[in-house]
Image (tube, helix red, strand yellow):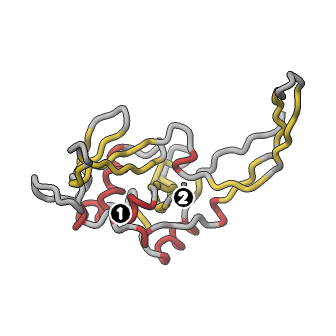
Amino acid sequence: MARHSFLVKYRRSGADGTGTDDFRTTCSCIPRVANFLDIKSRSYTPSPEDVTDRAGYTRSYIKADGSTGEVTVPASKAVYLAFGRPNARKVSLTTGLKTTKGSKRKLSFTFPSFLTVAEIADVLGELIPATKIATTATVGAGEIEPFFSIKGGRTYPIASATVAAASANPDVATTETEQATTATTTKSKKKKPKTTP
């Protein structure tokens, strides 16, 4: 299924342990979630810098008659986004909508595992419009609760729009201009391609 990706700039210590380097990554969700939260216009199409080479390889398999066959997968290009990374974090949001059984509907995002809980809270607070996050105990049908949960973890508060906007680390690129700037001024942590044995 197609997904909407959102560009995030984050900061880490330099390779030599001193200073800081700016990197970029993405979080993502399915179209239904983007439409509900009204963030479709903030989605990001990966830049050429995020495309990396994926080596070709040969795979063996057993045919129905018991003999062995081989299939060759050619070299190609790949974009490694959050949902394609191992150990990606699934983040759940709770809406005010009820299912036919009476439980509240859930929305989910996928974040790379190296982002901290605090960074995820900041990204959500900056990405999701404040009008979509409930500020009272009564959550409207078009709103979400001001919390998120991580699969296998606890529930945490989403940063307020004011706090999130004031923080430069992480920072969500929500316009084409910001995305172009982030894509050309940060580093991309690419997954290393497999090599043929």
Viewer-closest of 160 and 185: 160
Q: Position of residue 111 (x, y in %)?
A: 45, 48
SS label for mark 2: loop
Residue pictured at 47% horizontal, 55% vertical:
28
The tag on residue 127 is 1
From the image, which quarter does the N terminus lie in? bottom right
Mark whose residue sits in front, 2 or 1: 2
Near-viewer residue (8 or 130): 130
* Residue at which label 2 appears: 2
Residue drawn 67% across the image and 59% down it: 51
Residue furthest to the left: 137
Left or right, 55 with reference to 138: right
**Element class at badge 1:** helix
Q: Is residue 23 left or right of residue 65?
A: left
Q: Residue furthest bottom?
A: 177
| In front of the other: 47 or 73 | 73
What is the quadrant of residue 59 in the picture?
A: top right
Do residues under tags 2 and 1 come within 8 Å of each other at their CB atoms? no
Which quadrant would residue 60 be assigned to in this image?
top right
Upstream in sequence: badge 2 or badge 1: 2
Q: Which amino acid lies under the numbered mark 2 shown in the image of this protein? A: Ala
